[in-house]
Image: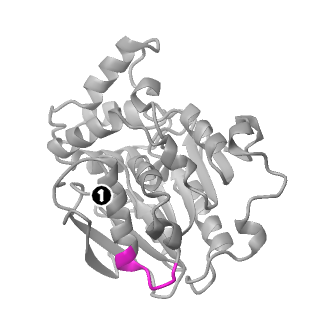
Amino acid sequence: MTTGPYAPPTARRTLEAVSADGSRLHVEVHGEEGAPAVVLAHGWTCSTAFWAAQIRALAPTHRVIAYDQRGHGRSPAAHAYGTEGLADDLVAVLEATLAPGERAVVAGHSMGGMTVMAAAGRPAFDERVAAVLLCSTGSSRLVEEALVLPLRAGRVRTRMTSAVLGSRAPLGPVTPVARRVLKYATMGPGSAPDRVEACARIVHGCPTGVRHGWSRVLSGLDLDAGLARITVPTAVIGGTADRLTPIVLARGLAAALPHCVGLTELTGMGHMTPIEAPEAVTGVIRDLAARHLAPSGTGTAAGAADTAPAADTAPAAAVAPATIPTTKEKTP
């Protein structure tokens, strides 16, 4: 799209970050230097354009850093596919864009959230990240829990879902039929046509080989250990109509995180929450930045009470999903 709220905004500057294996990543910086930093990691088959609404809303008051995952958007095809590569890439972006001592809020959608989990526990991550948003994502059992196919849970559904998501068939042009298929699989039933169009244009722009290569990584994903290493304040967002990463996965993340600061369940929303419910997603990012970044963008939190787990909080393993702070929002 070239106009409207989902058209990719023009970056103030662009650069290339070089990952550990030499992969080169397209990085965009929006907003003014010195403003509190927010880093956006998009999901499977997407690009920086996926965050257009968040970039437009946040750039007037934040420095918004968005990058194309390897093989997506304007980042060249991957040297290799794997969660270690995703983690290397995020670290490379943090090191290329943040000033010495500066920390950022990192928001990851879908595979971008998995990128965060994969990088957690690395010294560079712990030194650079003040808070996290995990949006429409999961740490494991993605294919087993997916509801894309209307079949009873079990081995047959898992095999068929893996085959569908891992298909090598080109997506082709964005047609009315293609929009309906994409809406069913990835978005809520009430999604507006312009939001469906925006998602379709982005997803259909992903090369077939890249889509297939990353699908194999996601089908065998197990980042439960990485999830446990995210010790900074972390918010979780999930759509109640998400077929790719169902809400049960968001609830599981919220229960397992060492320092979950809230689970937002977006009623009627599917997997593409930053486009389906842009105000809600932007609001959570903005709140994390206000609470956990100093106004100059170089500090940590606004106050110790906001960053430290409450003294009476039970260990993560003992916390039931119902005890996690939850916000439920209606369809816009």
Q: Residue at x 60, y 37 (%)?
A: 252
Q: Residue at x 23, y 45 (%)?
A: 204
Question: Would residue 106 be found to the left or right of residue 176 on screen?
Answer: right
Q: Residue at x 37, y 19 (%)?
A: 158
Mark 1 element type: loop
Question: Would residue 96 be found to the left or right of residue 310 on screen?
Answer: left
Residue on which disc 1 sits: 69
Tell me where residue 122 sits by quadrant: bottom left
Tell me where residue 156 sits by quadrant: top left
Q: Amino acid at mark 1?
A: Gln
- Locate residue 244, reporting x and y percent: 43, 33
- Locate residue 119, reporting x and y percent: 43, 57
**Front-most of residues 209 and 88:** 88
Please say if 94 is above or below 266: below
**Front-most of residues 60 and 74:** 74
Magenta segment: does it hold 97? yes
Please say if 119 is above or below 148: below
Q: State the scheme by which the image is colored.
A: one colour
Q: Is residue 5 visible?
A: no
Question: Would residue 145 be found to the left or right of residue 87 on screen?
Answer: right
Tell me where residue 32 sits by quadrant: bottom left
- Locate residue 117, reporting x and y percent: 47, 51
Which segment is the magenta one?
95-102
Question: Would residue 1 be found to the left or right of residue 29 on screen?
Answer: left
